[in-house]
Amino acid sequence: MSRAEMSMDRYRKVIVLGLDGASPRVLEPMMDAGQAPAFARLRQCGTYRRLATTTPSQSPVAWSTAATGCSPGQHGVFDFLRRDPKTYAPALSILRVNPRNLARRRSAMFLPVRHGSPFWRVASDAGVPATVIRWPLTLPPEAVEGRMLAGLGVPDLRGSLGRYTFYTTGDGLPGADDPKGDVVLLAGDGGAFHTHILGPEGSRDAPMDIAVDRAARSATITVQGADHHVAERAWSERVRVEFPLRLRRPVTAQCRFYLKAAEPHLELYLSPLEADPSAPAFVLSHPDGYAAQLALAIGGYHTLGMPEDTHALCDGALDPEGFLSLCSTVMDERERMLWHELDRFERGCLACVFDTSDRVQHVFWDADAAHRHVIPAMYRRLDAILGRLLARLDDRTLLVVLSDHGFAPFRRAVHLNSWLVHAGYMALEGSAKESDGLFHHVAWRDTTAYAVGFSSLFLNRRRREGKGIV
């Protein structure tokens, strides 16, 4: 009998519940105080341990290690960013566009970013079915004996990890020196505005009209002949927009509007253009039709790898209430995915990752008095999900609950390249006193080390780097 057969002889089903950023320093006091009864029950009846995370303790690194059992040196994910050693140019490590896909085939748009065999591949190769929902760095989705829906790393249709648009009759986003979205300034004092939605590369922008009703504190947005009504401090329904492409089929995007203010200035947030799961512009799932089947079964859902737009909140394009409403919607969708798959889960492995907990803690860890309840409320919601899951287990089911890292205050940062210059490991050209993220003004022939990303240091190696000397 094989090892897989022996394991399945004891457990017919294995459920892996991933909770991004779930921290023992938050959870343990809540368990002790009776505020997280499901987690407390699991701690009492099962096995509970504080585990070390990866170095560095970043989500793509840790989730890759959890999936493969490999160190970063083996699975190849070290940071959110990587660099081209020949040009030193930074690029995303969690998303790789296939440069050879000149015909832009849907099935060949992206390349794998992680090495090693994840547990769902090991299970699938042994004939054990696996369903994997939104595990980070699963784009392109793998052909498994089962189903997979890609998670963190899925881009928007403009090629970024999530670029919003902000329409306003005011002065833009005064609190954001470097907005992470596009700001469109609307001219005129009336209540009607004609503008556009910025489309994917190679497409034409979509015309859009905005009619503001200041008395009702609402707006009607007209896109491609369809009216979408949105009240102040509320979200619109999902809006589908079709963008024609030259010599190719049109691309269908989905997006949502949030009316931050109707007066004295119009402030309208447009979410990043996401792939429509009913007709995705690139392959989101395995099988390819699974994304559409899931949408038919549970309703529409976000496909962006990180739909919780923390950049928009920090820039002031979203207010806290709008951001938290968005987070609640994402959590609702993820729950529906989990319960739908659990209802038809008969054997094998089912893995599902909830990552909104990470996004909420990033922006509310040092919250003001009005929002100190946000993080405990998120943990109570995770506890409710776990409680519902525990109620459905039997003695032939193994449940694993894990997080990728914990959380702590962020009070100090070090600019590594500045330190490298100060310490003599990096040299600058001429009279330059600093460089930028693209390494302009770096004298590579006199540089032995450089930093890229959040925490990655590289030696400027000969025959590896374009101008290496080490």
Image (cartoon, rainbow, N blue to C red):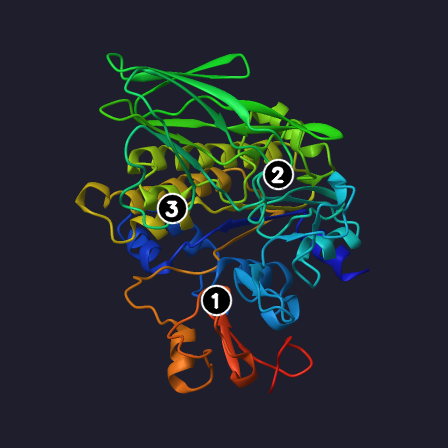
Which dot, 1 or 3, sits closer to the camera? 3
| Quadrant in the picture for the N terminus | bottom right
Spot the residue most to the right.
1
Instruction: Give me the C-alpha separation between circle 1 and circle 2.
Output: 38 Å
The crowding category of the residue bearing disc 2, from other C-alpha atoms within 10 Å (few below 14, some 14 to 19, many at least 20), is: few
- The residue that disc 1 covers is 53
Q: Looking at the image, is 281 positioned above or below residue 427? A: above
Please give left or right for residue 170 compared with residue 386 in the image.
Answer: left
Q: Element type at marker 2?
A: loop
Tag 1–tag 2 contact (CB < 8 Å): no
Whether residue 35 is visible here, answered yes or no, is no
- The residue that disc 2 covers is 201
Which dot, 1 or 2, sits closer to the camera? 2
Amino acid of disc 3:
Pro
Instruction: Give me the C-alpha separation between circle 1 and circle 3.
Output: 32 Å
Instruction: Choose between 439 and 216: the one closer to the eye.
Output: 439
Q: Which mark is residue 366?
A: none
- The residue that disc 3 covers is 179
- Occupied quadrant, residue 118: bottom right
Q: Element type at marker 1?
A: loop
- Residue 148, how many percent across, how many down? 67, 42
- Occupied quadrant, residue 287: top right
Whether residue 141 is visible here, answered yes or no, is yes
- Residue 85, how many percent across, how many down? 63, 71
Instruction: Choose between 191 and 389: the one closer to the eye.
Output: 191
Amino acid of disc 1:
Thr
Q: Residue at x 44, y 64 (%)?
A: 49
Please give left or right for residue 197 compared with residue 282 in the image.
Answer: left
